[in-house]
Image (tube, rainbow, N blue to C red):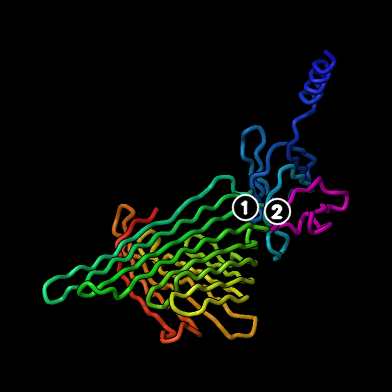
Amino acid sequence: MIRLATLVCALTLVTALPARADEVRLKNGDRLTGTTVSLTGGTLTFNARGIDLKIPWAEVTSLSLDTGMFVTVGTAAPFFTAFDAADAAGNVVLMPGGSVALADIVALTPRQSAWAINGGAGVGVVASSGNTQVDTIRLSGDIVAKGASDRYTASAVQARADDHGVDTARNWSVVGKYDRFLTSRLYANANAGFTNDVFRDIDLRRALGVGLGYQVINNARTQLTADGGVAWVNQNFKTNPDDSYTAGHESVSVQVQVVPGRMQVFHMHDGYFDVSGSNKMFIRTQSGGRLGIGGGFVTTAQWDVDYDRKPAPGRRQIDLTFSLTLGYRF
């Protein structure tokens, strides 16, 4: 009975507490409670009693954020925070950031709440018989899942070719990345890459890394990201001694919608540079373009370059691959 009475009292106190909400105060003395939607272009969008109000930012003397948002002060990078009402001098306290003038805040952006998932897959096939007997197949796929503060990226490619029944290419690779956004643009990064290539004598190459990245451009037409950090590389060869080393890692990805929804160009590369003194390095780049042919189907022309400064003995430093595939994007 004592426990039940305590629970009832606690529930009564909770339900008696007023619901917390954002509050905005204006120069004319008005005070509104509700939810801050956004601040952009000098206009505050504030939802009060289910109605979105457009308020000139210059008319606001105080604002309290109960729920965190990405806050942009002047030309600084946005960061996620909440803050209480402004003091008599018109200042609010940000964590991090300290005390700033409310008038110096130029943008308020809500944290993305839903997951956005996009990606695609493609296949390229060449088959011939008679005097020429060449069979080639290339399979590829990629997916990106973006949440409020997290982004997961994965891609894979497999290629195989034979000439008169003799293998001339056999390889696969898988790459995975996890990004944890610290601000709307800055993120911490963990990444892993796995490669197998018979003709480069690579049974399995593992590259595991961590670092920081930055979303340089992110709009409907252009996405540009760059990240860097440290990594551990381990290489198991088929016929040569295995090795491993510590490396610096850098990665860049850019995608541009030349004709939105119809034509896209892209470039991506990952580089690993030995920092332990053996002067080893390998870089992989993927560049090309996609042309939409309707219904989500695309044709992709892609040029891959794999460079290894110190390949297995008897192997060349550079492998070049051109592919033309039919695929589907979502």
- Amino acid type shown at disc 2: Phe
Instruction: Please tell me whether mark 1 sits on a helix, a strand or a loop.
Output: loop
Residue corresponding to mark 2 = 80
Sequence order check, earlier mark of 1 and 2: 2
Kindly identify the residue that appears in the image at 45 percent across and 61 percent down.
155
Element at label 2: strand
Q: Residues within 10 Å of mark 1 (few under 14, many from 20)?
A: some
Q: 24 and 132: which one is in front?
A: 132
- Horizontal and vertical percent for residue 215? 59, 64
Q: Which mark is residue 149?
A: 1
Q: Is residue 97 magenta?
A: yes
Location of residue 179 (image quadrant): bottom right
Q: Which residues are magenta?
A: 79-106
Q: Is residue 248 magenta?
A: no
Relative to 301, is 110 on the left or the right?
right
Dot 1 amino acid type? Ser
Q: Is residue 140 left or right of residue 148?
A: left
